[in-house]
Amino acid sequence: MRLFDPFDLVRPAFEAIDILVESQIVIGLRLTGMAGFWPMAKGETARMVNEKLQAGMDMGHAMLNAGMAGATPSQMAMAAMAPVRRKTKSNAKRLQRKVSGL
C-alpha cells in the first residue's frame, strides 16, 4: 500500500490549469479565424465539434480503465485528462503555427 502523497491532490489541479490555458488559446485562435482575420481551414468548425465528442468518449474510457485497474482518484483524474490535454496541446500548436507562419 502506498502512503498518502499530498501532491496527489495538486497534480490534477495543475493539469486542469494547463488544459484551461491551452483551451483558451485554441478558442481565441478559432474565433479569430472564424471572424476572418486569418485564413482558416475549411473543416475547422466541423473538426472543433467532432473533437469534443471524441475527447469526451476518450476521457470516459481512460477513467474507467484506470478505475478498473485499481487507480486512486487522483490517478483516475489524470488518466481522464490525458486525452483532452493531448488534443488541446496539439490544437494550440497547430493553430499558432498557422498564425505565425512557422
Image: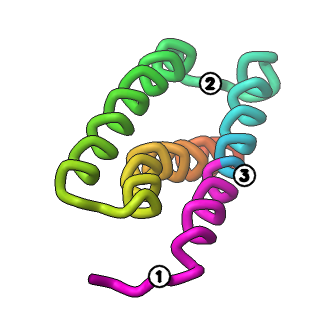
- Give the residue type at disc 2: Met
How far is the residue under mark 3 from the one under mark 2? 21 Å
Depth check, front residue: 100 or 21? 21
Specify whether residue 16 is painted magenta: yes
| Closest to the observer, 102 or 35 | 35
Percent across and percent down for residue 69 are 18, 57
| 41 horizontally vs 27: left or right | left
| Relative to 83, 88 lies left or right | right
Residue at the location (42% across, 18% down)?
50
Query: Mark 1 or mark 3, which has the lower sequence index?
Result: 1
Q: Nearer the viewer, mark 3 or mark 2?
A: 3
| Dot 3: element | helix
The residue at 72%/51% (across/down) is 21
Q: Is residue 98 above or below residue 77?
A: above
Q: Is residue 62 magenta?
A: no
Give residue 72's position: percent from left, percent from top: 37, 63
Disc 1 marks which amino acid? Phe
Span shown in magenta: 1-19
**What amino acid is at disc 3?**
Val
Residue in the picture at 42% in, 29% down: 56
The residue wearing badge 2 is 40
* Residue at disc 2, secondary structure: loop
Q: Which residue is mark 3?
A: 21
Coordinates of residue 39 in the picture (x, y in percent) = 67, 25
| Residue 4: assigned label | 1
